[in-house]
Image (cartoon, rainbow, N blue to C red):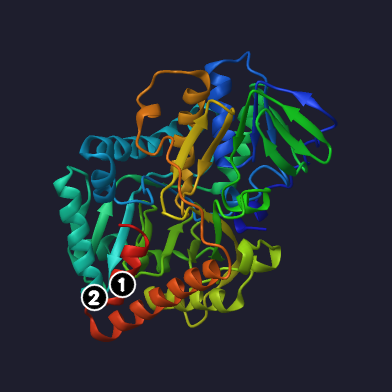
Amino acid sequence: MSFWTAVLPPQPPRPALAGDEDADVCVVGAGYTGLWTAYYLAVADPSLRITVLEAEHAGFGASGRNGGWCSALFPKSVGYLDRAFGRGAALALNAAMESAVDEVGRVASAEGIDCDYAKGGTVVLARSPAQLARARAEVAEAARYGIELHLLSAAEAKARAGATDVLGGTYTPHCAAIQPAKLVRGLAAACARRGVRIYERTPVTRLDPGVATTALGRVRAPVVVRATEGFTPRLPGHRRVITPLYSLMIATDPLPPAFWAEAGLAARETFADGRHLIIYGQRTADDRLAFGGRGAPYHYGSAIDPAFDHEPRVFADLARVLRTLFPFIGDEVPVARTWGGPLGVARDWMASVGLDRATGLAWAGGYVGDGVGTANLAGRTLADLITGADSDLVRLPWVGHRSPNWEPEPLRWLGINASLRLMTASDAAEARTGRPAKRAELISRMLGN
């Protein structure tokens, strides 16, 4: 169980499916994607019969475990989107992602969801000359497209996040810190108030046109939405559609005012640095540090298991990095809880959303760990696709995109874990030399950017 869920009052489970049922739309997965889709459908047409099927409980997956960044980050760079789809399409998708950050806050306010929403932006620290060079390049690219991304001096960066060895950084205002489990729990309640039927403890065993099959019954619907993200490989025929990669987190005890006087994050900015093996953190509403990162191995055959949520080596590495960033935290990081879970990655690192009108099968996902805001955009887009609304959202370049399948095993296992080692080695080389690691260019090419 994540820290986010552990601090909330226990919630009785919703009923499971009790036999066959008919619906207008059946959504598989009660995370952000599925619930936002159901919510916007119910708002657009209250007469729709909407059923949501969830294997565990609403928010069991990444929606209840993530780092709490409601950001405008998209897996593909704006430069890649420009080359692939044209400048106008790239800018439209970026603008839609930025608007999603505000839309989450708007709905939370309108529906009375207290999810600790604080739009403090994101600061990415540059703590080596190589990271500073990447920061300057990112700001230069953003400027070419008129996107707001500020280059920070060392003093400006440290004023936001008082970490060690800061040479500069970047700042974007387009991110809000949230409490993820509060958001998903409140969103599920908002859906239920609008008549959406949410069945928990109801694993879907098969998806077909017009029907979602479970051991407890079948839900027949003209439109069936796959909103399963990192758990997608568990569905028959979907083993190579999405790869689950694990991201792990720690949360500290509440930290004293003296710590925050040095650490800053006064606006609850989310924070990271420019290393290749991603780290991410936030100051929670009750003055803890919630901090996570990649580094856990990919498990053969896209395996998912609760045991994989706990990697002592990774937790120790996260605590070590926190001490490196903020040594005034003390000799031992006061860790209150550790947890983890799988996120979803498409083979071409391109998130997508779509509806096959011939089959009625719809999907969204492949967020590569930046799904809080993206799932909101996906839910609004799916609602427009399903209802036939002629909106700007349905013309965004990720709509209808089909990623290639991942390679079969053992190639998938070899390639992904080799990439993780390559990122780790690149960070070590840059720390030693201060120069951008040439091997990092391989990472960029593998990501298609």
Classify 406 as above or below 108: below
Q: Quadrant of residue 58?
A: top right
Answer few, some or many: residues within 10 Å of disc 2's Cα (few below 14, many 20 plus, some between 14 and 19).
Answer: many
- Residue denoted by label 2: 436
Q: Amino acid at mark 2?
A: Pro
- As drawn, the label of residue 82 is none
User: Can you give x and y, in whole percent of width and height, for residue 86 in the image?
Assistant: 23, 39
Q: Secondary structure at mark 2?
A: loop
Question: Residue 373: image x %, image y %?
Answer: 44, 42
Residue 42 position, x and y percent, is 58, 21
**110 and 97: which is toward the camera:** 97
Comparing 62 with 243, the one in front is 243
Name the residue at 52% across, 80% down.
332
Q: Position of residue 228 (x, y in %)?
A: 61, 45
Residue 59, relative to residue 189: is it above or below?
A: below
Residue nearest the viewer, comparing 282 with 370: 370
Give me the disc on residue 440.
1
Which three-letter amino acid code belongs to the residue tagged 1? Ala
Question: Residue 327, can we see it?
Answer: no
Disc 1 crowd rating (10 Å Cα; few below 14, some 14-19, many 20+) is many
* Callout 1: SS: helix
